[in-house]
Image (cartoon, rainbow, N blue to C red):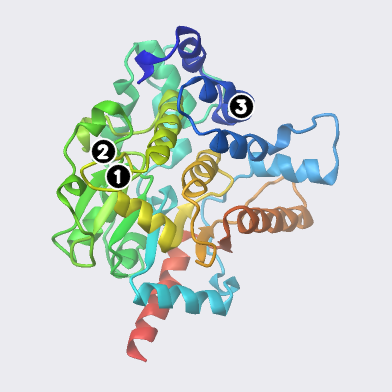
Amino acid sequence: MAGNCPRRVRLRAIVPVSLSARFTGRMTVLRKRRGVSSRICHELEPDVGLAATNRSRRSRRDRLDSMVDSARLPRCVEANVSGLAEQHWETLLDKIRQQSCTPFIGAGACAGVLPLGNGLTAQLRRSLRHSVPANADLARVAQYLAVERRDNSVPKAIVAKIIEAATPPAFVDDEPHAVLATLGAPIYLTTNYDDFMFRALVAKRPRAIREACRWTRSLLQEPSAFDKGLEPSPDNPVVFHLHGGVGLHGNRSMVLTEDDYLDYLVNISKDLANNPRTRRQRGMLPLKIRAAITNSTLLFVGYSLTDINFRVLLRGLVGALEPAHQVLNLAVQLAPEDQRAAASEIEDLKAYIKNYFDWTLRIQVHWSDARAFTRELKRRVEANAAA
């Protein structure tokens, strides 16, 4: 796809800039790439990069906006899971029992086993010959490396090697993937590159399979079980990698560099606009995956809602598919931490994040780490089954 872009647009796209800056000030790049949804551009522009709204004003709201962009998560948190409203627990358990809950797994589910974003970024930096700004995130460092080596596959190969070298967790007790595998969901969505969710499922349901989003034209030509009429079920579940995965299509499916994220958003926007109605019409997002996003309760586990990539995914994908307003969506979120902030400001930030996601996408935010939440989820599911 990139080779078909106007030269001026392509040159702007390869300049390594932060994702937050790109999605706030460079929406023209998206618009110039033909076919991108104007609605997605409109929705992304006012909501990303909150701290840049007015640098000359230092009001309380500006302080909260700055904290949203820079909030850091504690390395280890034993969170209190009692804060989730009891009616939300009841609804979640009902949805699980009805097989109408779709887990959405983020990097936090692998904490302590795989390096998270900062760890992967540090390891990629070692492969660079030139310096990169200290605040550069994973996508930006990967972009620098791809440009430096003139090969977009280089950073993907390095990240894949790091993940393949890691020892998978023991999928027992309250390990997040193990608990989620017991829910009997037909579809599991993830933006992780690893295959931990798949391994946890195969241990219980051997017919589980992995699929990746075919977000480029070349990937769209690759075979998919969905093209053959795959019907996900509790006995035949699917782990669908929205950002690709290690070992899937030779790592070409991985969304890693800044160019990847931009191309991904553009291509998915086109795909959503085409809206294939039969399996003969190949789609980057199969109809069964779209239905899971729109018609079931989404349970986000292991994400940071202040992560710009996750917010772009939510507004660009979940928002564009217009989920049913009556469906409860739940995000398990680590509480933000900022050494410079007073306790009252942290509480204001938590309130702001909860209100933001409830207002924009009707997502209920629950403050907990992945393991503490899945431990409580396991206890409640078992108690519910025994009742």
- Provide residue 160's location: percent of width, then percent of height: 28, 34
Looking at this view, is 84 or 99 the one in front?
99
Q: Is residue 32 left or right of residue 162?
A: right
**Among the two numbered marks 2 and 3 on one chain, the one whose residue lies closer to the N terminus:** 3
Q: How many marks?
A: 3
Q: Is disc 1 in contact with disc 3, using a CB cutoff of under 8 Å?
A: no
Instruction: Say which quadrant the C terminus sits in.
Output: bottom left
Nearer to us: label 2 or label 3: 3
**In the structure shown, which secondary structural element does the residue marked by tag 2 occupy?**
loop
- Provide residue 313's location: percent of width, then percent of height: 48, 42
Q: Residue at x 41, y 32 (%)?
A: 264
**Among the two numbered marks 1 and 3 on one chain, the one whose residue lies closer to the N terminus:** 3
Q: Is disc 1 in contact with disc 2, using a CB cutoff of under 8 Å?
A: yes
**In the structure shown, which secondary structural element does the residue marked by tag 1 occupy?**
loop
Which mark is on residue 21?
3
Q: Gap in Å between the C-alphas at discs 1 and 3?
A: 28 Å
Instruction: Identify the residue position indicated by label 2 in the image.
Output: 246
Q: Which residue type does callout 2 highlight? A: Val
Which mark is on residue 194?
1
Disc 3 crowd rating (10 Å Cα; few below 14, some 14-19, many 20+) is: few
Q: Is residue 230 above or below residue 194?
A: below
Q: Is disc 2 in contact with disc 3, using a CB cutoff of under 8 Å?
A: no
- Provide residue 361's location: percent of width, then percent of height: 57, 54
Nearer to us: label 1 or label 3: 3
Looking at this view, is 115 or 198 the one in front?
198
Q: Residue at x 34, y 65 (%)?
A: 180
Q: Which residue type does callout 1 highlight? A: Asp
Q: Quadrant of residue 31?
A: top right
Would residue 103 be visible to someone looking at this image? yes
